[in-house]
Image (cartoon, grey):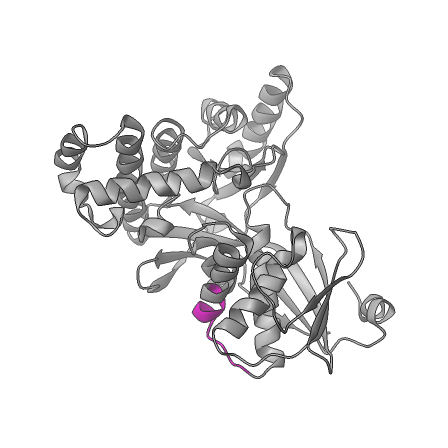
């Protein structure tokens, strides 16, 4: 992405370049909107934005990835439903900033991205966060990273209409290179935990099944509603408030009050929060290799209790573990997308080959396999 391309599009040189990464989640799935714990890391894949200010109160948006020409968004009167498609994400960020009382002006923004879309790697959060950071910097707002994340989440929740938690936006805004982010989504307290797999003789692989997940079909929203129903039946604000030690008693109470699906959702969230705690305990103890079985256990819970896996994701996990992986699990919202696989260096090639062979034997298209290198969060880059 170059200044020339932006100038050709909009007739003005860009004033700055910003980037925000996609993410994978090591552990802690569907816990964020239950005010639980998560542990994501940023990928080296980013969405980049070249931006120049305008004198009127208009956003003009172009994406090299989406095509379809320039989308023009008047800031005055901007409201949910006014913009559709990919441009709803950056437009929603502008709306959230205005709704939060921040003064922003018009801008021309050209986007480019190598974050795979539909792969469960948070391409939408990267688009939101890079827009929020660029508009914040250009407007002299000096917003903290967690504020950038909160406003980006509000854009997705209230403008786009996707009821996601804050995991993706916090990962994109707040991760640091060489670390995994241990985040309490209740109060956004966080700790950067060293995660240099290469020094441990291991790699964390991402397997993009190339099966496009579609949260818009309402499945994600139903899972969230079921979690809320479980919390209400147990008399707690969020499932985060159900202690792991009292899970069996809580499930026994739910047997008499809710549908079996709600009971399973509760079990997943409470046990998943405990899995995050187990992983951080192991990492803190210098036992990174021992997190593998916890990852695999988490996948079984997502498959059986939360019911958000897919045949392709299950195949990645089964083939990887059978070929010698230390552990594997789906990552992201589910219904397709990607899995993470923890492997010893010596086994990485064999595990990757086993996954490709399994997909071919099952008649699936070849997945994309790459290494997850913990990378930096959103930042301004030199032009």
Taking the spot 64% from the left edge, 72% from the top edge, the residue there is 75
Quadrant in the picture for the N terminus: bottom right
Residue 369 included in the magenta stretch of the image: no
Question: How far across and how far down the image is residue 70, in percent?
Answer: 78, 61
Q: Is residue 225 left or right of residue 380?
A: left
Q: Which residues are magenta?
A: 141-149
Q: Can you give x and y, in whole percent of width and height, for residue 241 in the image?
A: 21, 50
Relative to the observer, which residue lies in front, 217 or 282? 217
Q: Residue furthest top?
A: 361
- Residue 382 position in % (x across, y down): 69, 74
Q: Which residue sits furthest front?
A: 77
Quadrant (top left, top right, bottom left, bottom right) of the C terminus: bottom right
Q: Is residue 27 in sight in this rendering? A: yes
Q: As rendered, which of 32 and 80 lies closer to the eye?
A: 80
Say above or below: 113 vs 325: below
Residue lying at 52% horizontally and 28% vertically, measured from the top left: 316
Is any atom of residue 177 visible in this view? no
Left or right of 185 in this view: 325: right
Image x and y of residue 214, in percent: 56, 38
- In the image, is residue 6 above or below residue 317? below
User: Is 145 covered by the magenta stretch?
Assistant: yes
- Looking at the rendered structure, the number of numbered marks drawn on it comes to 0
Residue at 23 percent of width and 52 percent of height: 237
- Residue 4, compared with residue 319, is above or below; it is below
Residue at x-position 56% and y-position 81%? 103
């Amino acid at each position: 992405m170059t200044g020339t391309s932006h100038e050709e599009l909009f007739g003005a040189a860009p004033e700055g370049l910003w980037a925000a990464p996609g993410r994978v989640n090591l552990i802690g799935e569907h816990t964020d909107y239950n005010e639980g714990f998560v542990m994501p890391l940023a990928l080296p894949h980013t969405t980049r934005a070249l931006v120049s200010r305008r004198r009127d109160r208009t956003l003009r948006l172009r994406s090299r990835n989406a095509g379809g020409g320039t989308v023009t968004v008047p800031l005055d009167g901007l409201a949910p439903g006014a913009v559709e498609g990919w441009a709803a994400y950056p437009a929603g960020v502008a709306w959230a900033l205005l709704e939060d009382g921040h003064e922003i002006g018009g801008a021309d923004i050209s986007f480019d991205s190598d974050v795979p879309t539909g792969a469960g790697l948070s391409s939408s959060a990267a688009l939101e966060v890079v827009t929020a950071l660029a508009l914040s910097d250009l407007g002299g707002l000096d917003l903290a990273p967690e504020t950038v994340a909160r406003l980006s989440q509000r854009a997705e929740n209230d403008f786009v209409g996707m009821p996601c938690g804050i995991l993706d936006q916090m990962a994109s805004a707040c991760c640091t290179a060489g670390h995994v982010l241990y985040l309490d989504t209740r109060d956004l307290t966080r700790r950067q935990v060293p995660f240099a797999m290469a020094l441990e003789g291991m790699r964390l692989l991402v397997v993009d099944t190339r099966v496009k997940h579609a949260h818009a079909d309402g499945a994600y929203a139903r899972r969230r509603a079921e979690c809320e129903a479980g919390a209400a039946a147990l008399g707690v604000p969020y499932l985060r408030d159900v202690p792991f030690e009292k899970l069996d008693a809580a499930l026994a109470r739910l047997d008499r009050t809710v549908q079996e699906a709600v009971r399973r959702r509760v079990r997943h969230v409470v046990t998943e929060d405990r899995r995050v705690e187990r992983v951080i305990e192991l990492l803190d103890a210098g036992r990174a290799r021992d997190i593998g079985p916890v990852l695999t256990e988490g996948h079984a819970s997502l498959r059986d209790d939360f019911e958000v896996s897919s045949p392709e994701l299950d195949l990645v996990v089964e083939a990887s573990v059978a070929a010698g992986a230390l552990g594997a699990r789906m990552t992201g919202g589910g219904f397709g997308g990607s899995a993470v696989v923890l492997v010893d260096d010596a086994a990485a090639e064999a595990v990757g080959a086993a996954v490709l062979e399994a997909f071919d034997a099952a008649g699936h298209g070849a997945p994309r396999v790459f290494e997850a290198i913990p990378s930096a969060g959103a930042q301004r880059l030199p032009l």
